[in-house]
Image: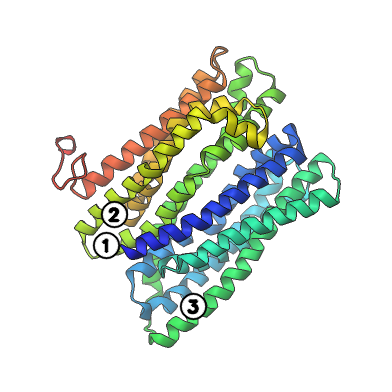
Amino acid sequence: MGTFFRGVLVLSGAAFIGECLEFVINMVLARELGDEAFGLYMAILPTMLFVVVLASVELPVAISKLIAEKEPNYHWGILVQSLKLATICALTVMVAALLILPQLSVLQQYHVGVQWMLFLLIPVITFSSVAKGYLIGAHQTSKIAIANILKRTAQLSGLLIVFYMFSFTSDLAIFMALLALKLSELLVLFYLVVVFIRKIHQTKKGHPQKKVSQKEVQKKLLAVSIPTTGLRIFHSITFAVKPFLITTALTNAGVLESVALVQYGKLAGIAFTIGFFPAFVAHSLLVVLIPIVADSYAKRRYDTLHYYLRLSLLVTFGYGLPVVLVFYFFAEPITTLFFGPSPAADYLKILIPYFLFQYCATPLQAYLIGIGLVKDAFLHSFYATVVSFCLMISLGSMPSLQMNGIIIGMNMSAVLLTILHYITICKKLKLNMLMRPGESKLFR
């Protein structure tokens, strides 16, 4: 339990600082880019996230799970095989990127350097993923925390230097903003490599290493990596499609395309920035829970699994409920304070169910990954997304609802996803709906 709370507190503290910096970053971007360019910047982020998902191949999750399950004597062998797999994955994704990126029409309205930046981002993300996975599995959460702060600090510093010393056209300004993000990732890679080398040297010195089967390690890594990557790819695709689906629905409702793009920028850049600000706690829970759940489930410690499930949800509601109440009652003062008067205040109020249930879904997803139910997590996301997109298109196209209809669809997806996750975990761990031992009649 000490490891759990220490990990959550360290990661949450660092993530809080990172979210504050992210908040400032979005304020700088919103002010310097202008409404339309800021909307274009937010619209390209899902594509960048998709590239990041492919490049990482969810190695942090797979490696951290395997490291947590194995004794330190096997860590070096696992990492050697992980680096081999990472190299193959990076080369494969880079070749695919060379062929696909120039064909994407969505990139045609951006500076040509954006394509090359996305291409060069691939190896940086892949090898950072190996280091992150090892450090998470070895419970070196403080190192991950420092890396997160370093990334945001470097990104903000780059933006301030670029925008306050130079003046750019709209497309070049977007490119420079994305370049600052790329360079921050490069700095994080350098830091992680240094920490990774020092830590693995200490492990090898204190624990005589044993050989591991290359086939076995790669099989176990891929058993987690492939389905988890599939889940992330699905999320990334839906995230990338969402801006165009939303703008299409709004134009069907009679909104001008340029206005619809601005409204999406307000939704994604302001309402989501504020609403997901406390999600650093949920992400910290996910990072800490995966190795704990994987280790406990491998050793069939069901009492431990039950305890941490209750604890993680208690922590989630402990911070989530007060936060969303503050968002609801003080939406307008909060958005005005940081972004000026904006319709995003109304968006924030209606999105309250979405944020609260997303906070809950994150630690539940960690449980699904830890106990080997990634396939179920994927199916839950698929069902929730189908329902969400259908509602977003139908309700968002109604002139009387417009963006409110879009948000109702988002709320339904978060509620459905959380319920499906919760029911599946309770059934797997032989808990009833109140998280007490004993199957519920619902599962029979």
Q: Which numbered disc, 3 or 1, marks the residue that appears first in the sequence? A: 3
Q: Residues within 10 Å of mark 3 (few under 14, many from 20)?
A: some
Q: Quadrant of residue 69?
A: bottom left
Task: Tell me the CA gap for discs 3 and 1.
Answer: 24 Å
Q: Which mark is residue 296?
A: 1
Residue 308's label in the rendered image is: 2
75 up-or-down from 444: above or below: below
Report the Cα–Cα distance between label 1 and label 2.
10 Å
The image shows residue 411 at horizontal and vertical percentages of 44, 29
Q: Contact, CB < 8 Å: mark 1 with mark 2?
A: yes
Mark 1 or mark 2, whichever is nearer to me: 2
SS type, badge 3:
helix
Most extreme residue toward the top is: 400
Q: Mark number for residue 199?
A: 3
| Circle 2: element type | helix
Q: Could you tell me the amino acid type at mark 1? A: Ser
Foreground residue among 349 and 121: 349
Residue 117 as seen in the image, left or right of residue 207: right
| Kind of residue sitting beneath label 2 | Tyr
> Cα distance, mark 2 to mark 3?
28 Å
Which secondary structure lies at badge 1? helix
Residue 207: give x, y in percent of width and height.
38, 85
Q: Is residue 204 above or below residue 237?
A: below
Q: Residue at x 41, y 46 (%)?
A: 362
Q: Amino acid at mark 3?
A: Lys
How many neighbours does mark 1 have within 10 angstroms: few (below 14), some (14-19), or many (20 or more)?
some
Q: Position of residue 262 (x, y in %)?
A: 68, 28
Left or right: 433 as drawn, with respect to 118 = left
Q: Which mark is first along the chain, 2 or 1?
A: 1
Q: Which mark is residue 409?
A: none
- Asked if the residue at tag 1 contacts the one at tag 3, i.e. Cβ–Cβ closer than 8 Å, the answer is no
